[in-house]
């Protein structure tokens, strides 16, 4: 997986192109059917920058099951030049970072949701997602 986008905005990961595609807007209505993994981050947030280093492993672990979206502001919605990102922070009621939001969507509505704030280890994140959503990581192909 390529690195995270380095500018403010909302981006969806396109696995086939190994690229982040910008989105013009993002609200809960924009979640896709199945598993959605949304990472809310801030460029001036030290814990976010630490989690950024782990995020490629998270994408590798769950990309067979989940659609990944990253919402990036400079510093929450207070210091955010991207209207789409600012509105997404508001729509999902995110005020701490990093925030990980995972939802299983069925028939257009979240059936199950999990929210984790902070900087978990990969093992803690996997355990939490399994306990909360019964979401397992992808099997390794190596």
Image: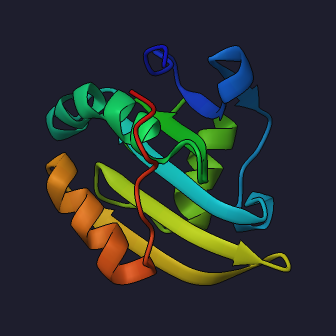
Residue 96 on image: x %, y %: 29, 57
Q: Quadrant of residue 140?
A: top left
Position of residue 118 relative to residue 134, above or below, is above
Compared to 1, does 89 lie above or below?
Answer: below
Front residue of 24 and 38: 38
Q: Residue at x 61, y 58 (%)?
A: 36
Residue ID at (24%, 25%): 53
Q: Residue furthest right?
A: 107
Residue at the image position 23 percent from the left and 37 percent from the top = 51
On screen, residue 110 versus residue 7, left or right, reads: right
The answer to whether residue 80 is above or below residue 19 is: below
Q: Is residue 78 visible?
A: no
Residue 58 in view (yes/no): yes
Q: Say left or right for 111 vs 33.
A: left
Q: Number of callouts in the render?
A: 0
Q: Quadrant of the C terminus?
A: top left
Q: Which of the pair 52/92 is nearer the observer?
A: 52
Residue placed most toward the observer, 92 or 120? 120
- Taking the spot 70% from the left edge, 66% from the top edge, the residue there is 28
**Quarter of the rendering containing residue 58:** top left
Figure quadrant of residue 25: top right
């Amino acid at each position: 997986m390529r690195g995270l986008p380095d500018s403010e905005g909302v981006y969806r990961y396109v696995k086939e192109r190994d690229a982040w595609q910008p989105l013009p807007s993002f609200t809960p209505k924009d979640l896709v059917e199945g598993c959605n993994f949304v990472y809310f981050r801030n460029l001036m947030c030290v814990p976010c920058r630490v989690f950024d280093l782990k995020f490629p492993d998270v994408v590798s672990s769950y990309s067979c099951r989940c659609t990944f979206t990253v919402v990036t502001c400079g510093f929450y919605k207070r210091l955010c030049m991207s209207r789409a990102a600012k509105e997404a922070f508001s729509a999902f009621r995110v005020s701490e970072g990093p925030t990980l939001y995972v939802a299983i969507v069925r028939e257009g509505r979240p059936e199950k949701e999990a929210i984790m704030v902070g900087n978990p280890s990969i093992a803690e994140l996997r355990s939490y997602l399994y306990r909360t959503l019964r979401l397992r990581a992808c099997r390794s192909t190596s």
